[in-house]
Amino acid sequence: MGQEAAAPIAPAVTAATPAPKLLVVIAVDQFSADLFAEYRGRFTGGLARLASGVVFPAGYQAHGATETCPGHSTILTGNHPAHTGIIANQYYDLSAARADKRIYCAEDERVPGTTSKGDGYAPSVEHLLVPTLGDLMKARNPRAQVVSVAGKDRAAIMMGGRKADELMWLSPKGLTSYRGTALSPTAQKASAAIAAALAQPREAMPLPLDCLSHDIAIPLGNGATVGTGRMAREAGDYNRFRASPEADGAVLATAAALRAARKMGEGDTTDLLIVGLSATDYVGHGTGTEGTEMCLQMAGLDRELDDFFKQLDATGIDYLVALTADHGGHDLPERNRQNAWPDAQRVDRALDPDVLGKQVAEKLNLPQPLLYGVSGDYYLSKALTAQQRKAALAEILPRLRAHPQVEAVVTKEELAAHAISKRAPDTWTLMDKLRASWHPDRSGDFIIALKPRITPIAEPGVGYVATHGSVWDYDRRVPILFWRKGLAAFEQPNAVMTVDILPTLAALIDLPVDEAKVDGRCLDLVSGPGSSCR
């Protein structure tokens, strides 16, 4: 399939070109470098435009905890999770005042009556330890506008930061924001339109010819199959809505409406519009990465981005787009086994911290619960004496290290002694990856890394058959794309990182950044003589 015609001709961008009036930063949840490579030749819309700009196909979420919240925390802070403090989607704070010791990355657990489970938490940016690009822009010039809208709260919050003028995300009611924060009239109108669309059923989508090869049912062993879906849904089915291009279209339409209402990019400052598109992640989790569902999602994402960019083109604003992802993704093992990877497995239940902790506590006559764990971080109970703690570790660590699905078990003492790597991310050791996600006050007493192609879901369930989160490159590698009218295209296959995005954009708008306070570096977007890293 051919790509779209080049965007409107504009004067060539050089090192001397003034700053763009609008920065548009887009994060596509679970848009791995593998997906980008697989579908790149099929894109004809918005993604084709971006692929005709400055392309870094070997971008990295360099750290080991490749989850949504840590990944989004790197994109507009220039820092690894070790410095953002966002080590995982959820972690444990056994000293927390509330009974629920599990902490959601984008909540404030100090709010009375809250819990990390379901919708019981109070969304908050409290746990983000560093400023975002928007925070720095507002600190320099309070008139700079920052708007963040996403499919998930953690995407909007981690990229939007503390000073966003408007910040919101999708919900079953349309759009929502922080508790006690009213949506603007424009956002209220967008929310009502989304709710109205959700209230209508959606017919099955026609399957394009280039998706036919993906149309193979994969049995899950529980009577269900995936791989042949057409994204039909009943009226009001929010779960199916959010796992479709319809959800991404709703977020992009909201972003366009907010830009127009606020006249972003039309004043004497540079403004920042942040967009988090989450449907690809929901599709990946619910049906895997290689079925008709993902094929339809990629075509829809390309189409929705095309419509969004054309709206921006019509304004005549000089805007720059940066697009990347919060992490990659891994297909479900049942399909991997059919597609030439027979060793793909699901995780052994024996590695579950509750199961392991109970076994060890009973053997050593230790208090229960002994062990807490989530996302590879394992925490020993605070009720243990120093002697009991030593005995527990002496029993647990050898067990885990001998397990055939475990690549490594690393203690907090080992991580504390390991410096954050300054090398290119494609050369990082396993310790380098884990260290970039480790925070002394939030990470576990030890961290487990599973071997490649081990899916950390013991049994597939409805809407959750595949995942990400490993230290391996299929979860770490993401595309990083930049586009601006007049910006000469080039492709750089060497490894760069998502933490490089903030210093790159800051340089474009002459925003000083203390290099000692970020982990990333500026990427020169000007091909040939001169540099955008001014």
Image: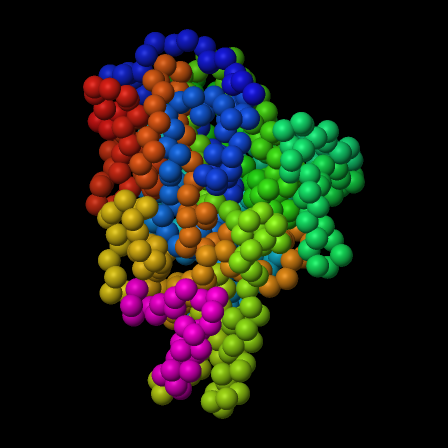
**Is 297 or 22 nearer to us in this picture?**
297
Above or below: residue 292 compared with residue 269: below
Q: Going 27% across and 34% down the picture, which residue do you hit?
A: 522
Residue 398, percent from left and from top: 40, 78
> Image check: 196 left or right of 365?
right
> Image check: 518 left or right of 326?
left
Q: Is residue 175 visible?
A: no
Query: Which quarter of the rendered picture does the N terminus lie within?
Result: top right
**Is 355 or 473 nearer to us in this picture?**
473
Above or below: residue 53 compared with residue 74: above
Query: Which quarter of the rendered picture does the C terminus lie within?
Result: top left
Above or below: residue 158 compared with residue 113: above
> Image check: 248 left or right of 385?
right
- The chosen color scheme is rainbow
Residue 357, percent from left and from top: 51, 78
Place residue 417 in its image quadrant. Answer: bottom left
Place residue 349 in its image quadrant. Answer: bottom right
Q: Is residue 226 visible?
A: yes
Magenta-span inclusion, residue 398: yes
Q: Going 74% across and 53% down the picture, which residue do you hit?
A: 224
- Secondary structure of the magenta portion, mostly? helix
Magenta-span inclusion, residue 395: yes
Q: Going 73% across and 59% down the picture, which residue do you hit?
A: 222
Q: Which residues are magenta?
A: 388-415
